[in-house]
C-alpha cells in the first residue's frame, strides 16, 4: 500500500512509523523544514492523567472573565468569522459534565496506549530523557485544590494513581523551591521527556526505515472522484498519487480538509514556552501551577515554562502581557526561584521587548495547538473520502497521544482490529 501523509509534525511522523511497520510505502509531505513546529515547544509531559477535555464545565464563565484580563491563561479573540462562531457554539455545547464523563475513558485509553508504545518502540531507540516521576498539580487556593481533587477521583476511577498531598508533603518533595501552595495532587503514572530531542531524532529514524520525507512540499489541491482522492498537486506543480492519504496538519487542518471536500471544526490555540539553561533546575518533578495555568518541566541542565491558550486566527504577533504573566507566576508559586539569575535576565529581556513592541525574542517560542470543538482529537476515516484518514485536533497533547494515534491510523489503514475503541474520535461527529 502506498500512503501519503500530509503533515510532518509529531502525529504525522508517528503515523509514518507504524504504517512503515506494516510494510507500507510511506511518503510524508511537510510544508516546512521540520526544524520547528508545535511539538518542539511542547512541555514534554505525557500526562495520562489529563482525562478532562478542554470542553468542560465552567469554561464559559472562565472564558468571559479571562477575556478582560490581558495576562489570562485562556483567551478567545472576539470575531464574527463563521468558523469561530460555529466552533465556539459547539465548544460551549460540549462543556458539560456529561461530556467529561463520556470523554474521560477514551482519552485515558489513548494516552495509556501512547505511553506503552513510546516506552516500547521509541524510547529504546532514541536519547529523549524519558522519566517517570509523575506530575504535580500545585494549588494555591482551596477552591482550586477542591476542583483538582474531583479530577483526581475521576482519574482513580480509571485505574491510575492520584495522590492528595498536604502543603508539608509538597515541601518535602520540592525542598529547593519551597512551593507556596495549600496542597497538590500527584499523578504518579505520568512521565516526561525532551520533545526537542524527540523531534530532532525521529525524522532520521524514519528515513532509515525507508520513509520518504519531502520537505517544503505544500499541497495546492486534490483530484477527487466518486468519494475518493485520486491524487494531489503540490504548489510546485508536482502530482502525487497514493492508495491512501492521511491528513495530519494540526492547526492547518480546516483549510486542508476544505480542499479535500471535508469539514473540521477546529481552531488554532497559540501557546508560549521559554526554556532556561540552568545547571540545576531545582524543580524535581514536572508541575502545573494550577491557579495560573502555567506548566513547568525540569530536565538535566534546563527548565521549561509554558502556558496560555489563545484562540484566534493564525498570526505572528506576540501577546507580551501573556508571556509576562507566565514569568510573574513562577516565583509567586515557587519562591525558591525568585532572584534566580537566569529567570531575572529572561524577565528583564521580555519586559524590554514588550516596551519596544518587538515581534520576537530569543528563547521565546510560540506555536499553534489544534483545538477541536469538543476537546477530543479527530482520528479515523473522513466522511466524504473513502481513502482519507484524519489524525488531528490533539490540542496541547500531541506528544501525549502520538504513538497511540499513529498505531490506530496504521491499523485502520491496513484493515486490522484497532488497539482501543475509536468511536469517540470519529471525524464528522
Image (cartoon, rainbow, N blue to C red):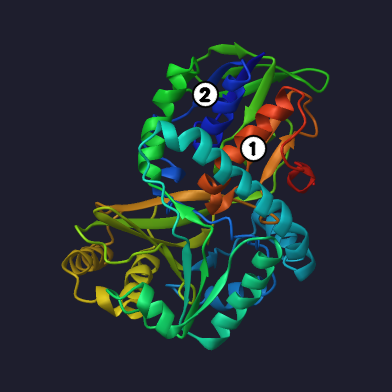
Q: Earlier in the sequence, mark 2 or mark 1?
A: 2
How many numbered tags mark residues here?
2
Residue 40, how many percent across, how many down? Answer: 40, 44
Residue 417, how many percent across, how many down? Answer: 77, 31
Lateral position of residue 274 relative to residue 239, left or right: left
Q: How far apart are the alpha carbons under marks 2 and 1?
A: 14 Å
Q: Quadrant of the N terminus?
A: top right
Q: Residue at horizontal 77%, vertical 20%?
A: 228
Q: Is residue 225 visible?
A: yes
Residue 153, picture quadrant: bottom right
Lateral position of residue 373 relative to residue 292, left or right: right
Given residues 220 and 161, the one toward you in this image is 161
Is 15 above or below relative to 111?
Answer: above
Given residues 350 and 317, the one toward you in this image is 350
Residue hosting label 2: 29
Q: Residue at horizontal 54%, vertical 46%?
A: 398
Q: Residue at horizontal 48%, vertical 27%?
A: 30
Lateral position of residue 311 relative to residue 264, left or right: left
Is 185 above or below relative to 99?
Answer: below
Residue 251, how many percent across, how many down? Answer: 56, 44
- Mark 2 lies on a secondary structure that is strand
Viewer-side label of 2, 1: 1
Q: Label 2 neighbourhood size at 10 Å, few (<14), some (14-19), many (20+)? A: many
Residue hosting label 1: 391
Residue 329, picture quadrant: bottom left
Amino acid at each position: 500500500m502506498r500512503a501519503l501523509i500530509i503533515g510532518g509534525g509529531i502525529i504525522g511522523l508517528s503515523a509514518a512509523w507504524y504504517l512503515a511497520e506494516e510494510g507500507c510505502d510511506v511518503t510524508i509531505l511537510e510544508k516546512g523544514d521540520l526544524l520547528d513546529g508545535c511539538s518542539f515547544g511542547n512541555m514534554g509531559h505525557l500526562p495520562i492523567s489529563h482525562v478532562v477535555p478542554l470542553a468542560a464545565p465552567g469554561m464559559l464563565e472562565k472564558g468571559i472573565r479571562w477575556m478582560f484580563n490581558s495576562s489570562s491563561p485562556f483567551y478567545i479573540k472576539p470575531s464574527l468569522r463563521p468558523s469561530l462562531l460555529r466552533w465556539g457554539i459547539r465548544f460551549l455545547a460540549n462543556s458539560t459534565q456529561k461530556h467529561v464523563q463520556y470523554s474521560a475513558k477514551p482519552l485515558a485509553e489513548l494516552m495509556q496506549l501512547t505511553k506503552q508504545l513510546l516506552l516500547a518502540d521509541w524510547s529504546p531507540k532514541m536519547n529523549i530523557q524519558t522519566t517517570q516521576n509523575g506530575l504535580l498539580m500545585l494549588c494555591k487556593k482551596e477552591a482550586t485544590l477542591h476542583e483538582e481533587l474531583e479530577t483526581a477521583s475521576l482519574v482513580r476511577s480509571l485505574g491510575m494513581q492520584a495522590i492528595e498531598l498536604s502543603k508539608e508533603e509538597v515541601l518535602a518533595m520540592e525542598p529547593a523551591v519551597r512551593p507556596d501552595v495549600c496542597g497538590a495532587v500527584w499523578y504518579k503514572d505520568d512521565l516526561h521527556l525532551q520533545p526537542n530531542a524527540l523531534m530532532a531524532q525521529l525524522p532520521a529514524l524514519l528515513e532509515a526505515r525507508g520513509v520518504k520525507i519531502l520537505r517544503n512540499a505544500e499541497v495546492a489541491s486534490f483530484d477527487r472522484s466518486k468519494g475518493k482522492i485520486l491524487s494531489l498537486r503540490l504548489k510546485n506543480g508536482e502530482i502525487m498519487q497514493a492508495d491512501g492519504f492521511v491528513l495530519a496538519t494540526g492547526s492547518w487542518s480546516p483549510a486542508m480538509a476544505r480542499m479535500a471536500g471535508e469539514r473540521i471544526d477546529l481552531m488554532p490555540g497559540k501557546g508560549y514556552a521559554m526554556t532556561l539553561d540552568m545547571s540545576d533546575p531545582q524543580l524535581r518533578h514536572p508541575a502545573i501551577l494550577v491557579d495560573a495555568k502555567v506548566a513547568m518541566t525540569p530536565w538535566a541542565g534546563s527548565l521549561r515554562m509554558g502556558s496560555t491558550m489563545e484562540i484566534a486566527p493564525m498570526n505572528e504577533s506576540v501577546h507580551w502581557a501573556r508571556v509576562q504573566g507566565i514569568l510573574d507566576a513562577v516565583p509567586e508559586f515557587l519562591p525558591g526561584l525568585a532572584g534566580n539569575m537566569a529567570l531575572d535576565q529572561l524577565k528583564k529581556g521580555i519586559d524590554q521587548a514588550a516596551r519596544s513592541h518587538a515581534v520576537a525574542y530569543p528563547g521565546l517560542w510560540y506555536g499553534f495547538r489544534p483545538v477541536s470543538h469538543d476537546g477530543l482529537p479527530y482520528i479515523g476515516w473522513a466522511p466524504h473520502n473513502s481513502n482519507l484518514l484524519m489524525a488531528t485536533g490533539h490540542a496541547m497533547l500531541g506528544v501525549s497521544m502520538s504513538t497511540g494515534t499513529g498505531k490506530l491510523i496504521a491499523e485502520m489503514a491496513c484493515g486490522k482490529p484497532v488497539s482501543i475503541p475509536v468511536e469517540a474520535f470519529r471525524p464528522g461527529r
